[in-house]
Image (cartoon, coloured by chain):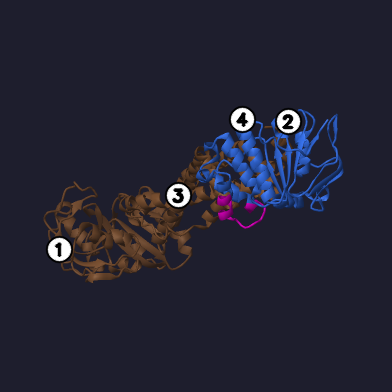
């Protein structure tokens, strides 16, 4: 589970104060708000990609704001899966190798069987040996969900995962995320301005 | 995984990787080829010159005298009077003196009239037949026998001069009595007879007054009384003083010339050394250029892969891992260039070896082994790889994950 307290961050001349949030294992929390309200910044803080100017973030009892850069890299690799708005992959590796890379970088054993299972669950098994540039946006979005799940993270963070998808795909991706998070017993936090998601998830918080 | 990924990344940027690889291979191949050539040529020339302190011959170019008398790759400077030469051959400072009479050839292989000491000097061993004891009997060097497919018992007619189309001496044929084992010396490329054979061959044309048959005279000493000419004498001194005294006295007081192989060969090496150095510098230049292209390639690909790198950080990669990834890419490129370069230089040498052997009597030996200088070359290539990758690698280290990810 994840809990934040008095989280603040400031860009030069632009301070942000975030409400305290908490999300338990198997739960879904929707963070909404219009552009410029610090949604992505909050996600980066939660994922340990950026250090807050004050406040604490505790994931499974570990205060990640107190970790060194190296420890934080390791912690992130092992505990946090992130799905970005633009699904990016290592261009020189195929989809399966990209999934395996996630395990390797987190210093875990490369589990090809699991990678293939995840691709099958997300219905993109046939894309496993293709380079990322050969896949459509929707397929890449699914592949990035599979990658985020590779190391069985306890926290899944998703940044605008549905913004570039049509209604049908939006619903499919959203339910996939929720389903996979529940299956892995992970806390899922989705940062979005997509109003469609509000109808699907009821536990939400709005940044103002 | 990180190594595999580095290779995949290089393959992904095929064109620029290929350019770096080709540039470095070319640079390494040029430098290594020149190093090998220089080493082989110097080694070959210095083994042939071993134990020859001075060469006595007709006045002319001292370098030409050495090249013709020791290596048989140039025309003789002229003839000297045998009687005159003998005074110096018997000089108390002289430990060993080998007279040479050459100028004729068979199928472009030189026929050298000399004493038995010549074959001994190069430790020549018979592989077949017996040594030449009588006039118009010859022993063949291993390469000559192999190239001309001559066997013992065969007779051939020599030609005047070294050209294939020279005037041939039809009056008298040479009988092959023996074939030498390969020795790796100049012997391999020569046809060796006694001196009297050469004198007799030219008697009908040179000395019309003396028609007397001398075919059964055994040693050079006996014929010395008659007016005879030879081409050169190889001398070994017994005393170090001779190195200083004899050449001066001979050059000043006689109409003959004394040339010191050591000095002349040094002069020759320093002459073509200038060419070698220039070419080598071009090779080093190409290598540095390739280093630059590795730098540009990695730098550009880093720009494209910035997001990728940040992404890898979010998946748990440490800064160190990204630094290593870029460094390994640079190193793998340079290592590949180094290996193909070294291979290329040896392949080139292998193709040229035959020509060198035919034209310059140069036999390349042990050229597959790496030279000491090539270890420096390898070190330089690896340092080049690291240096070229260093700036991009450090840039990868300092990538700001959050900024990079939100900018796109």
Task: Measure the alpha-carbon separation of dots 4 and 1.
Answer: 96 Å
Q: Which mark is residue A166?
A: 4
In whole angstroms, how far apart are the C-alphas of marks 2 and 3?
A: 66 Å
Instruction: Tell me the SS state at disc 2.
Output: loop
Task: Please name whichever residue, B291 or B273, is drawn nearer the observer in this view of the structure.
Answer: B291
In the displayed structure image, the side of residue B218 where residue A157 appears, left or right? right
Residue A172 in sight in this render? yes
Q: Residue beneath label 3, please? A: B33
Task: Please state which of residues B126 and A31 is positioned toward the viewer in this rendering.
Answer: A31
Q: Is label 2 on the same chain as label 3?
A: no
Q: Nearer the viewer, mark 1 or mark 2?
A: 2
Q: Which residue is mark 2?
A: A193
Q: Which residues are magenta?
A: A103-117
Residue at 14% x, 63% y: name it.
B154
Which quarter of the rendering shows the C terminus of chain A?
Answer: top right
Contact, mark 2 vs mark 3 (Cβ under 8 Å): no
Q: Colour of chain A?
A: blue
Q: Quadrant of residue B147?
A: bottom left
Q: Is A106 within the magenta? A: yes
Mark 4, secondary structure of its residue: loop
Given residues B93 and B191, the one toward you in this image is B191
- Measured in 3D between alpha carbons, the distance from the residue under mark 2 to the one under mark 4, in whole angstroms, is 15 Å
What's the CA distance linking mark 4 and mark 3?
64 Å
- The disc at residue B275 is none
At 48% from the left edge and 65% from the top edge, which residue is drawn? B240
- The x and y percentages for residue B116 are 28, 68
The secondary element bearing badge 1 is classed as loop
Judging by the rendered image, the residue that carries numbered circle 1 is: B154
Look at chain B in the picture and name its colour.
Answer: brown
Residue under mark 1: which chain is it in? B
The label nearer to you, 1 versus 3, is: 3
Look at the magenta stretch and give its main secondary structure: helix
């Amino acid at each position: 589970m994840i809990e934040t307290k008095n989280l603040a961050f400031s860009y030069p001349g632009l301070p942000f104060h975030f409400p305290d949030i908490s999300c338990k294992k198997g739960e879904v929390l929707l963070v909404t708000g219009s552009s410029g309200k610090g949604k992505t910044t909050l996600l980066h803080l939660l994922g340990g990609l950026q250090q807050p100017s004050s406040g604490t973030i505790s994931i499974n009892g570990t205060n990640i704001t107190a970790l060194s850069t190296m420890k934080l890299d390791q912690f992130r690799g092992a505990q946090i899966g992130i799905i970005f708005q633009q699904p990016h992959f290592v261009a020189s590796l195929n989809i399966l190798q990209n999934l395996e890379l996630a395990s390797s970088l987190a210093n875990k054993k490369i589990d090809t069987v699991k990678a293939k299972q995840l691709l099958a669950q997300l219905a993109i098994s046939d894309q496993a040996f293709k380079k990322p540039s050969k896949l459509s946006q929707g397929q890449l979005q699914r592949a990035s969900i599979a990658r985020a799940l590779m190391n069985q993270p306890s926290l899944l963070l998703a940044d605008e995962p549905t913004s570039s998808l049509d209604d049908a795909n939006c619903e499919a991706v959203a339910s996939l995320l929720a389903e996979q998070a529940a299956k892995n017993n992970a806390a899922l936090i989705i940062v979005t301005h997509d109003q469609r998601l509000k109808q699907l998830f009821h536990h939400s918080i709005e940044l103002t | 995984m990180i190594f595999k990924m580095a290779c995949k990344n290089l393959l992904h940027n095929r064109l620029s990787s290929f350019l770096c690889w080709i540039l470095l291979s070319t640079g390494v191949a040029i430098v290594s080829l020149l190093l090998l050539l220089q080493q082989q040529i110097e080694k070959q020339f210095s083994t042939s010159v071993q134990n020859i302190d001075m060469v006595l011959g007709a006045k002319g170019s001292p370098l030409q005298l050495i090249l013709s008398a020791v290596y048989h790759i140039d025309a003789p400077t002229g003839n000297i009077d045998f009687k005159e030469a003998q005074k110096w051959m018997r000089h108390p400072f002289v430990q060993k003196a080998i007279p040479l009479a050459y100028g004729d050839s068979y199928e472009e292989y030189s026929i050298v009239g000399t004493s038995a000491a010549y074959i001994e000097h190069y430790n020549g061993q018979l592989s077949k037949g017996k040594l030449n004891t009588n006039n118009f009997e010859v022993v063949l060097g291993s390469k000559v026998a192999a190239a001309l497919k001559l066997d013992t018992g065969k007779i051939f007619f020599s030609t005047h001069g070294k050209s294939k189309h020279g005037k041939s001496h039809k009056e008298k044929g040479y009988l092959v009595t023996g074939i030498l084992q390969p020795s790796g010396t100049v012997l391999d490329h020569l046809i060796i007879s006694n001196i009297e054979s050469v004198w007799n061959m030219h008697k009908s044309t040179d000395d019309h007054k003396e028609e007397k048959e001398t075919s059964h005279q055994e040693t050079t000493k006996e014929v010395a009384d008659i007016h005879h000419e030879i081409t050169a004498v190889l001398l070994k001194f017994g005393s170090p003083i001779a190195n200083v005294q004899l050449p001066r006295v001979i050059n000043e007081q006689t109409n003959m010339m004394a040339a010191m192989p050591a000095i002349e060969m040094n002069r020759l090496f320093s002459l073509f050394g200038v060419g070698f150095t220039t070419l080598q510098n071009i090779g080093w230049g190409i290598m540095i250029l390739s280093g630059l292209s590795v730098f540009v390639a990695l730098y550009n690909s880093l720009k494209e892969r910035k997001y990728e790198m940040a992404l890898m950080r979010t998946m748990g990669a440490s800064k160190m891992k990204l630094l290593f990834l870029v460094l390994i890419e640079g190193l793998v490129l340079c290592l590949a260039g180094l290996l193909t370069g070294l291979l290329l230089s040896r392949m080139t040498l292998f193709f040229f070896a035959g020509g060198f052997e035919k034209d310059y009597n140069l036999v390349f030996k042990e050229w597959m082994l790496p030279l000491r200088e090539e270890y420096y070359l390898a070190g330089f290539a690896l340092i080049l790889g690291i240096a070229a990758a260093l700036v991009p690698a450090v840039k990868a280290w300092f990538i700001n994950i959050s900024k990079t990810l939100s900018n796109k």
